[in-house]
Image (tube, rainbow, N blue to C red):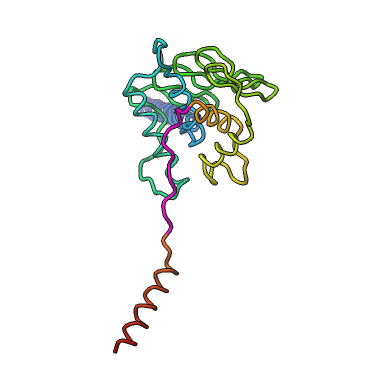
Amino acid sequence: MMRQARKHAIRMLSLFVGAFIATLASGASAQRILMASPTCEELTIMDFLARLDEEEGRYKRGLDAQGRRELSQLRREVCAPYVGYRVTRHPTTTWSNGRSIVRGYLELNHPNGRIAKSRSGEWFYPSGARAKSALGQWEYANGLLARAPTGEWYTREGKYVEDADAWRAKACDYLGKQLCPIGKADEDLLAVTMMGLINEVAPPKQEARPEKDDKGKDEKSKKDEDGSEKAD
């Protein structure tokens, strides 16, 4: 009887331990599922916001030099496939300081820990100032209007922007055919790109990798061969 009771106790203990480990594993798996890597579009918006946040003569409360470099580098790496380059780095969910980039698929954080995008779709500068309201109005970090809900655009000095359609076309050209196919792009991405171009703070454009012209090479080789035959 004592032996059977002991075996039963050991069996129950192993079942409990197994269930506990399974629970931990499922929890870890669920946590991994809830985490996500930032997209090229999201990182491009954040990079523009960080650059627009830096204004001469205004007290800087945004990203430090390391945060700026890390954000720009991560954007280049994540966006590299869009311009034909291969990247071997695995997707990341945290900044180098350990802070999360994405939380619950909906929220984004800047490297300094401040919120970049809220669950309701609002965007914020690294300094904490709101860039885009839930109603779609864009503002500069100094509080001045960038784009009114009715569509008018302004510089961060408050000057009215003439021919906004031309600036929109420039923004689409800057983004390239992968991010702005057939003249259409994510509206938030297009808006913040226009803000960067209008105020001349856009990151350097990532040029597409030149495609190998095998046909041209073959034709050149053929011409060279024809020329050598004639010379003979």
Query: Any magenta on residue 161?
Result: no
**Which residue is pictured at 48% across the width and 37% down the height?**
40
Between 34 and 43, the one nearer to me in the picture:
43
Quadrant where the N terminus is found in the figure: top left
Furthest residue in direction top, as rendered: 59
Residue 119 in sight in this render: no
Query: Any magenta on residue 202?
Result: yes
On the picture, is 29 further left or further right than 171?
A: left
- Res. 5 image quadrant: top left
Furthest residue in direction left, as rendered: 232
On the picture, is 189 further left or further right than 148?
A: left
Between 38 and 224, the one nearer to me in the picture:
224
Residue 79 in sight in this render: yes
- Residue 18 position, x and y percent, is 42, 31
Which secondary structure is most common in the magenta stretch? Answer: loop
Q: Give the range drawn in magenta.
A: 200-211
Between 200 and 209, the one nearer to me in the picture:
200
Furthest residue in direction right, as rendered: 150
Furthest residue in direction bottom, as rendered: 232
- Residue 157 position, x and y percent, is 52, 16
- Residue 72 position, x and y percent, is 39, 31
- Residue 108 position, x and y percent, is 49, 24
